[in-house]
Amino acid sequence: MSLISILGIAIALAMDAFAVAIAVGISLKTISARQTFRLSWHFGLFQAMMPIIGWALGSAIHNFVESWAHWIAFGLLAAVGTNMLREAFDFEKDTEAEKKDSTRGLTMVMLSVATSIDALAVGFSMSMLEIDIVTPAIIIGIVAAAFTITGMHLGKKVASFKKLSVLAEILGGAVLWGIGLNILHQQGVFETFLFS
């Protein structure tokens, strides 16, 4: 597989991480170097690990994982998106310090898994095509980390405008829901419901 093909795959896989990172930046409003490192490291690590896991598992459980992966990703993104929307409408927040930090704990793990599920399928595909996974996984991880850093700081810039802050946070939660619903749409879930 050529380097250009691998980069194309890496950029495509990084789009969800980029959109989620923008939402996180909007939610946090101020971002420390530690928060930037934590989220970009985890998003990059999960994006690099998932293709390796998918490649290692191969086609043995491909059909089972493929049939549930979109629901897992949707559920995780919807949960975090709902939390962001709830915080946006919580007008009794006392301080910014009380705001939940999406770069820590279970929320960060949920976002990392949700944004890297597609990479699992890429690993399966590469396994079936007998393509070595090490170089693609490293490139996928680096690109995801870079897109995450860019997205977080872009989101922070949007949130720095006080009047746009609540609106931006609502938009961030809606974006996470949108990504989750788009994952279901791409898997034909809505067609199944409409025509069954």
Image: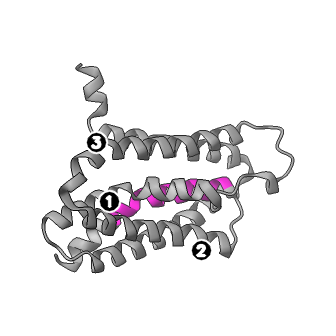
Q: Residues within 10 Å of mark 1 (few under 14, many from 20)?
A: many
> Where 170 falls versus 25 (above or below)?
above
Instruction: Kindly identify which residue carries mark 2.
Output: 37
Residue type marked 2: Phe
The N terminus, quarter of image: bottom left
Rounded to the nearest angstrom, the CA distance separating label 3 from label 2 is 33 Å
Residue 176 left/right relative to 33: left
Residue shown at 19% from the left, 66% from the top = 127
Residue shown at 69% from the left, 41% from the top = 88
The C terminus, quarter of image: top left
Residue 28 left/right relative to 139: right
Principal SS element in the magenta part? helix
Residue shown at 30% from the left, 23% from the top = 193
Instruction: Kindly identify which residue carries mark 3.
Output: 67
Q: Is residue 16 magenta?
A: yes
Residue 45's x, y, as percent? 46, 71
Q: Which residues are magenta?
A: 11-27
| Number of the label disc, if any, that sits on residue 120 | 1
Residue 184 left/right relative to 107: left
| Res 7 seen here | yes
Residue shown at 26% from the left, 62% from the top = 57
How many numbered circles are shown?
3
Residue 22's x, y, as percent? 55, 57
Residue farthest along the left direction in this orientation:
129
Residue 81's x, y, as percent? 56, 43
Rounded to the nearest angstrom, the CA distance separating label 3 from label 1 is 13 Å
Q: Residues within 10 Å of mark 2 (few under 14, many from 20)?
A: some
**Camera-side residue of 73 and 166:** 73
